[in-house]
Image: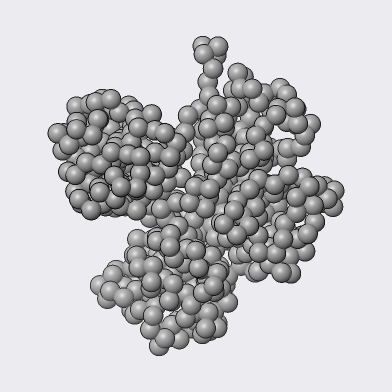
Amino acid sequence: MRVVICGAGQVGYGIAERLASERNDVSVIDTSRSLVQNIRDNLDARGFVGHGAHPDVLAEAGAEQADMIIAVTLHDEVNMVACQVAHSLFNVPTKIARIRSQSYLRSHWQDLFSTDNMPIDVIISPEVEVGEMALRRIALPGAMDVVRFADDTIAMVAIECRDDCPVVDTPLAQLTDLFPDLKATVVGILRGDKLFVPASSDQMVAGDIAYVVAERSHVKRTLGLFGHEEPEAGRIVIVGGGNIGFYVAQQMEKRSLGAKIRVLETKHERAVTIADSLKRTIVLHGSGLDQTILNEADIAEADLLVALTNDDKVNILSSVMAKRLGCKGNLALLNDPDYQTFTRTLGIDAFINPRSVTISRVLQHVRRGRIRAVHSIQNGLAEAIEAEALETSPLVGTPLRDLNLPHNLRVGAIYRNGQFVRPDGQTKIKAKDRVVIFAAAGAVRHVEQLFRVSLEFF
C-alpha cells in the first residue's frame, strides 16, 4: 500500500513507523526539517520538507500513485485542505484527517465532510477518542486498559496481576474448569517487556498484565476474580479544563453518573467558560501542582484524580501529589512513550496514551479485509482486531482446533446474531460472525488474510 502522511509529529511518526515496518510504501511531509530528518534517519520511509496541503509537495511525495492520505498535522485546516487537494487533483481513494476543533464536528454541520463538500472519508477527533477512553477507565476501576467491540457487547480489559491476585500460578485450562460459566478468555500476557499469546498450559504470575476478552456484563466479575474489586469513584478531581477535561466532565453530567466532580484549570478565562457550561461540576481556577488548590478540591477525600492537561510532566506530578495527599487512585494522560515506562514506579495506577488511540483508529482503515475495529497494544507489540467472517474465509465451518492457526494469535470472542459466544476448540465460526482476535505483531498479516475477500466471492 502506498501512503502519504502529512505531519511528522508524535502521531505521524508513530503511524509511519508502524506502516513502514509492515513494508508499506510510506512518504511523510512536514514543514519541520528536523522532524523530516528524524523520519529519514530512523524509518524505512521517505521524508519531504514542505506544506502538506500544497499540490507540488503532495505530487513530490507521490500522491498521484497513493492509495491513502493520512493528514495528522497540528492544524485542522491544513489537514482538511490536504485531503481536498488529494481528492481533487490526485484522486486519492482514501482520505483520513485528524480534526481537533469540535466546532467542525457539531451534528448540524454533518454534511460538511461529504464527497460534494469536503471529501474526507474518515475523521479522527483525538479529544473525543481520548475522552471516551478516560470515561471507560473511570467506569471500570481496576482495569488498566479498556476497549469495546461488537456494538459495545464485548470488552477487552488489561488487568494487573498483583501479589494477592487469586488466579496467579494456575494453568489457564484449569481456570476454565473452575469458572465454566464465566464468559471471558485470557488472550494475551505482558510479562516485563515481553508480550505473548498464552497456551492453555501457561499460567500468570504476579506482576503480569493479562489481556482478557469478555462479554461486557461479565467484565466486573472478571476483575473481581483477579482481585480487583475497587468501587466506582464517587469523588473525582480532573486536572485540566481543556478540550479533553471539559469533554469528560460534560459527558459525566450528560450520562447522569453519580460522581461528584471538580475540575482544576490554570487559565482564568477558560475556567469561567467551562464553569458556565457545566451544571453540577465545581470548577476551580488553579494548578494541579498547587497543593493549596488540591486541598481546596478536597483531594484527601477524592477517589480518583484524572490528569488530562497537555503537559505530561504536570500530569505525572499532579498524580503523584494527589496520592501523597490521600487520593485513592489516579489516571494520567501521557504522550511521551519514555514516561510510560516508569509509571508504576511513581505510583501512577493507569495512563492513557493518546498517540496509541489515534494510531488504532488509523489502523482500522489501513488493515485489509473486513476489519471493523483495531486497537494497538503496548506501542505495537500486538493488536486486538474485530473482523467479519465471509463465506470464503478459511475460518468458516472448521472447528478452531483444526484450523492450525499461528501460536501468536488467539480468538477471544465471537459475536453472532447479537449474542456473545465464548470460543473453544470445538467452536465453528459461521459466515457473518464478527470475531475478536488478539494477535501479536507478527500475526497481524495472517489475520488480514483470514478476513480478505477471495476472488471466488465475486
Residue at (55, 38) in percent of width and height: 442
Nearer to me, 439 or 369: 439
Quarter location, residue 136? bottom right
Vertical comparison of 290 with 246: above or below: below
Q: Position of residue 394 (x, y in %)?
A: 64, 22
Quarter of the rendering occupied by the N terminus? top left
Nearer to me, 235 or 73: 73
Please indicate whether residue 36 sits to the left or right of residue 124 in the image: left
What colouring method underlies this structural image? one colour
Residue at (77, 64) in percent of width and height: 166
Vertical comparison of 440 with 303: above or below: above
Query: Extreme front residue here?
Result: 41
Residue at (29, 44) in percent of width and height: 40
Q: Position of residue 292 (x, y in %)?
A: 40, 88
Please indicate whether residue 296 sits to the left or right of residue 303 in the image: left
Vertical comparison of 410 with 275: above or below: above
Q: Does the rendering let one see residue 254?
A: no
Q: Position of residue 22 (x, y in %)?
A: 45, 36
Residue at (74, 69) in percent of width and height: 164
Q: Position of residue 316 (x, y in %)?
A: 44, 72
- How many numbered discs, if any? 0
Query: Extreme bottom residue here?
Result: 292
Q: Does the rendering let one see residue 45?
A: yes
Quarter location, residue 61? top left
